[in-house]
Image: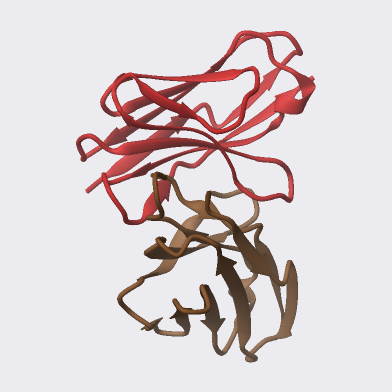
Chain colours: A brown, B red
Amino acid sequence: GENVEQHPSTLSVQEGDSAVIKCTYSDSASNYFPWYKQELGKRPQLIIDIRSNVGEKKDQRIAVTLNKTAKHFSLHITETQPEDSAVYFCAASGGTGRRALTFGSGTRLQVQP
Amino acid sequence: SQTIHQWPATLVQPVGSPLSLECTVEGTSNPNLYWYRQAAGRGLQLLFYSVGIGQISSEVPQNLSASRPQDRQFILSSKKLLLSDSGFYLCAWRETGSGPQHFGDGTRLSIL
């Protein structure tokens, strides 16, 4: 089955700096890659997603890149703000015989004011 | 627009007691439905998913069970709770096929 690895597990940056979180996946048939942000005690919320027919997608300060050959995708947050502090999860789906997202283990991002 | 409702928000139960958590989705038909558990400070563990009424796939063998009695209703149950069942339980839905998955607000379950 699909395996998604995410790193780093924790990331601390200064306000205004960029943050990058990376994920790798194992199933070459996966074709959908969302990113979720989870604030303390709350539900994960979708912040951006990308499909395998696109290499990059951007939404204001957030961008995601996908390298299908290497089977990895990354989340880029520019001009970080304290409210970006949260746990971020990557996920993959669409692989053979599986109808659920496979999540990475999460990255705790702390933006220092 | 679609909405997902999950209740209760918090629950405190003694060891050995039964459990029933309910999740309903509005504004869509034949969604894929999911139950996840999240231990404190940890990732999302998929427990069950369903692609249709009465169709349940179990990801992790344990003392929990799930049922889907109606198209947009998903229930998580246990006959006898264990201390290890404590956690944050999240229901989620997704349109049939590939696409974003949307989570409910979750139930925080504490076992005493």
Residue B36 vs residue A97, the one in the foreground: A97
Judging depth in this view, the residue of B54 and A68 nearest the camera is: A68
Q: Which one is in front, B82 or B46? A: B46
Q: Image height check: is B49 above or below A94?
A: above
Residue A73 vertical placement versus B37 (above, below): below
The C terminus of chain B: image quadrant: top right
Q: Pinpoint residue B96: horizontal percent, then vertical percent.
A: 26, 44
Whether residue A113 is visible: no
Image quadrant of residue B18?
top right
Residue name at image x 73 percent, y 75 percent: A11
The residue sitting at 40% across, 61% down in the picture is A29
- Image point (45%, 65%), residue name: A28
Report the side of A21 relative to B21 (left or right).
right
Which residue lies at the image location 33% right of the left edge and 38% below the top edge? B32
Vertical order, B2 against B55 (above or below): below
Left or right of B42? Residue A68 is left
x and y, in percent, of residue B91 in the image: 47, 37
Q: Residue A60 lies in what quarter of the image?
A: bottom left
Q: Is residue A4 above or below residue A63?
A: above
Q: Position of residue B88 (x, y in %)?
A: 63, 37
